[in-house]
Amino acid sequence: MEIKKVTVQEAVDLLKNNNNIQLLDTRTFAEVRATGFIKGSMLIDTSLPTLEEEILKLDRNKEYLLY
């Protein structure tokens, strides 16, 4: 697994040009309710006790942009 930091513009470009990338929202449900979400993103609430189970369900053939 490789982890890289990208700028907002790099993230936008990656999402536009690569169908194998999923935007992954790692905020809590409360944070999402308070501030909204980016259309097409997938939410994994990092405060839940099932976090590890949710991570294991992710498609290992995809790349993920976390925010």
Image (tube, helix red, strand yellow):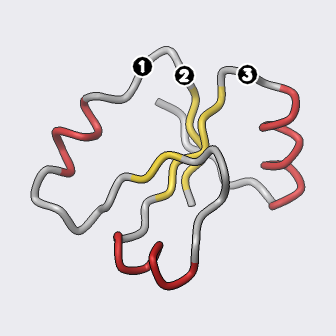
Q: Mark 3 points at which residue?
A: 19
**Kind of residue sitting beneath label 2:** Lys
Residue at point 29%, 62% (across, down): 46
In the image, residue 58 sits, relative to residue 12, either above or below, namely above
Q: What element carries label 1?
A: loop
* Badge 1: residue crowd in 10 Å (few <14, some 14–19, many ≥20): few
Depth order, front residue of 10/17 = 17
Residue at point 42%, 19% (across, down): 60
**Kind of residue sitting beneath label 3:** Asn
In space, the residues marked 3 and 1 are separated at their CA atoms by 14 Å
Q: Are marks 3 and 1 in contact (CB under 8 Å)?
A: no
In the image, residue 22 sits, relative to residue 31, either above or below, namely above
The label nearer to you, 3 versus 1, is 3
Residue at point 24%, 30% (across, down): 56
Locate residue 33, reporting x and y percent.
45, 77
Q: Quadrant of residue 37?
A: bottom right
Locate residue 62, reporting x and y percent.
54, 22
* Badge 2: residue crowd in 10 Å (few <14, some 14–19, many ≥20): few
* Badge 3: residue crowd in 10 Å (few <14, some 14–19, many ≥20): few
54 relative to 11 in the view: left or right: left
Q: Do the residues labelled 1 and 2 touch (CB within 8 Å)?
A: yes
Q: In which quarter of the image is residue 47?
A: bottom left
Q: Name the residue under label 1.
A: 60
In the image, residue 27 sits, relative to residue 60, either above or below, namely below
In space, the residues marked 2 and 3 are separated at their CA atoms by 9 Å
Mark linked to residue 40 = none
Q: How many marks?
A: 3
Q: Name the residue under label 2.
A: 62
Locate residue 39, reporting x and y percent.
66, 52
**Kind of residue sitting beneath label 1:** Arg
